[in-house]
Amino acid sequence: MGIETFLTRPLAPALERGGRDDDVVMSTRIRLARNIDGVPFELKMSDSDQKAVLKAFEHAQTRRPNDVPELILFRMRDLSPLVRAVLVEKHLISPDLMEKEGGAVVLSDDEMVSVMLNEEDHVRLQVFRPGLDLSGAYALSSRIDDWLEETIDWAFDETLGYKTSCPTNTGTGMRASVMMHLPGLVMAKRIQALIPAIQKVGLTVRGVYGEGSEAEGGVFQISNQVTLGLSEGEILENLEGIVRQVIEHERMSREMLKQSLGVALEDRIFRSLGTLRYARSLSSKEALTRLSDVLLGVYLGYIEGLSAKKLSALWVSIRPGFLQYTAGKSLDAGARDMARARLLREALR
Amino acid sequence: MLCENCGKRPATFHFTKIVNGQKTEMHLCEECAREKGELLPMSKDAFSIHHLLSGMMHDLSQRPAASSGERLSCPSCGWTYEDLIQTSRFGCSECYDTFRAQLRPIFRRLHGSEAHTGKVPRRGEERLSKRRKIEALKKELEQKIAEEAFEEAAKLRDKLRALEKEA
Ligand SMILES: [Zn+2]
Ligand SMILES: [Zn+2]
């Protein structure tokens, strides 16, 4: 399978099936950071060290068991900057990896698994699941880790755990993240109080598009901060407990807004739908805000005949890289806004 | 408020990180934030963590207890203590052993702990227990020799050789 397949579909097949609590949780991701014993870390690596990492992975590939999905390797140097940008927009690679000529990404055809090679750590394996599914995502990531470990010696310390390039990941090397759509909390202005509360319990919250409480489209990612001293199970349990509370607060906020604002909320949602259906030029920020409103409208039952899945796909296809890849040429900001409006018009007609 | 980086334009991007109740804030203008890749999706983590971490490590390195690390450098990759503080990154896996003493307050501050309690590589676990057995046998052997129990010592030596071959 060529890289084109991954670039022409905005929504990963792995995320198409609705997951648990998917009215609030868009997706779950587990990322494990691992390094190969005896190979210098990112900042001290030579070209041949980078090749050794790719080789080690390719060797493991020859012994892949049946319960690990087939994985296809793409070297960064073979991918154009635009292709890399699209992979970043789909969250399959990090902006960091985008800059690494010696790096590579390994993908399963349904995009449930993405392994980054020669990023900040030699191996960063990621598993994505729809909705809230921390244990499912961890189970698969740990299984892949077990498989790789059969042929690769990880840099591991008896007391400190997995040795990572940066001390913020030392220990489990695990970053668990839950991507949440919180338009209710944003609209009710309760998000400002919630963010610092979540940060106090060792988790981080950030806007996926834009920063802080100004997150565009109301999309936030909640992740664990601590990787040392707690087991993977404890980290996931803590995160899940907080995420569950946020889900409840979001649902309550939506219901409260519906009751207190009534027709004003309905009006706002339909105005957003109207804008997406008829506008001739839309900035990324405005498009995300309007899409967020419309998605809320679908969940509150105001809008019928539009699926959440279709809207989630649009979330990605209006990003600058994706628009330009689809257009087959580079577009300046003005041209992108027009292409974005056209795409939304056609999709929501 | 002015941008912390250029000191010219007003700061419109504000970042806060809190770990174990320690709060650090950053204020940047749009231009500087963009320059640092701050506006790219997903890149925020990388920048803010490394930047803030290096500041924190610098503070810790000013303490008297950390000064013992100043002349250290990693025998495997040549990474110095200075490199560690400035980049807040390790050069190789042996750096962990080289700077072990200096790392303790850093891990305490970052994670509130200095000891891993999570997953252990399966093969690593086997190796680990073998290594522990070898250590135990060596001690026992020394003792038998000291006691001049040569027959038992010979048996232990055979056992030890077999184990060492396996490991
Ligand atoms: Zn500035
Ligand atoms: Zn080193």
Image (cartoon, coloured by chain):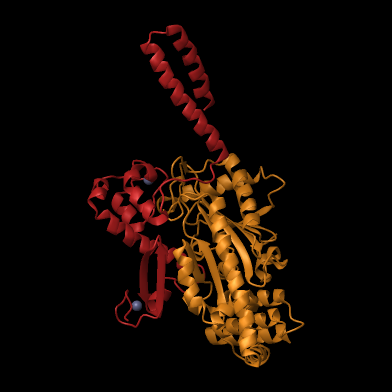
Chain colours: A orange, B red
* Quarter of the displayed picture in which ligand 1 can be seen: bottom left
A82 or A257, which is in the foreground? A257
> Would you say residue A116 is visible in this rendering?
no
Residue A63 as seen in the image, left or right of residue B95: right
Q: Residue A30: percent from the left, percent from the top?
A: 58, 57
Query: What is the number of callouts on the image?
Result: 0
Q: Quadrant of residue A150?
A: top right
Q: Residue B144: percent from the left, percent from the top?
A: 41, 13
Q: Residue A94: percent from the left, percent from the top?
A: 53, 63
**Quadrant location of the C terminus of chain A in the rendered image:** bottom right
The residue positioned farthest toward the right in the image shown: A305
- Residue drawn at point x = 54 percent, y = 25 percent: B166
- Residue drawn at point x = 52 percent, y = 63 percent: A223
- Residue drawn at point x = 66 percent, y = 53 percent: A71
- Residue drawn at point x = 29 percent, y = 58 percent: B58
Q: Residue B30: percent from the left, percent from the top?
A: 41, 79
Residue A189 as seen in the image, left or right of residue B64: right
> Would you say residue A119 is visible in this rendering?
yes
Position above or below: B134 against A38: above
Residue A36 as seen in the image, left or right of residue A5: left
Position above or below: A315 against A99: below
Position above or below: B102 against B153: below
**Quadrant location of the N terminus of chain A in the rendered image:** bottom right
